[in-house]
Amino acid sequence: MSKMDTKDFLIGAVIGSIVGASAAMLFAPKSGRELRTDINQKAHQAKDKTVELTHAAKEKGSEYSQLAKEKSDEWSQVAKEQWNKVADRTVGISNKATQMGEDLASDVKDLMENEKAEGKKLAKQVVKEIEETKEKLKDDVEEFKNQ
């Protein structure tokens, strides 16, 4: 029953049973009283069968409904768990990115401090060399004047 649902099947079965039973009774060679008795019995049998099939259909419907609810709850729980995993990973990645940014900022700050210190050393050395060159020039000028 690929696309046929239970309700359509039951309706078809009941109608088919009624038509088949009626045709059999009408074509059977019996007296009027016997025919009415047979029709009455068959009608009661059809009614009983209909009640039985209806009850079975309701039970199956209830079972399928319960199964669908359980599966829905199960899938919902799985989806929640997956969502929580994704959220946890996102928080972890965010924290890691923040830490890496802080580490990078610290490294850059340290590098800048080192470069600043090296720059001061270099500036002092340049000033010293300029002073030495100045003194040397003074000495050379004095020597030149004396010659």
Image: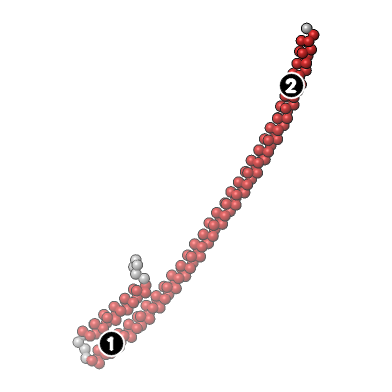
Give the quarter of the image for residue 28.
Answer: bottom left
Residue sitting nearer the eye, 143 or 3: 143
Residue indicated by mark 1: 39
Query: 122 left or right of 10?
Result: right
Residue furthest toward the left?
29
Give the quarter of the image for residue 4.
Answer: bottom left
Give the quarter of the image for residue 136.
Answer: top right
Residue 129 disc label: 2
User: Callout 2, which amino acid?
Assistant: Glu
On screen, 114 above or below 56?
above
On screen, 135 above or below 64?
above
Structural crowding at the residue carrying mark 2, measured as other residues with C-alpha within 10 Å and reported as few (<14), some (14–19) or many (≥20): few
Point out residue 40 in the picture as x, y percentages from the top left corner: 30, 88
On screen, 13 above or below 99?
below
What quarter of the picture does the N terminus occupy?
bottom left
Point out residue 78 in the picture as x, y percentages from the top left corner: 51, 59
Residue drawn at x 56%, y 57% is 84
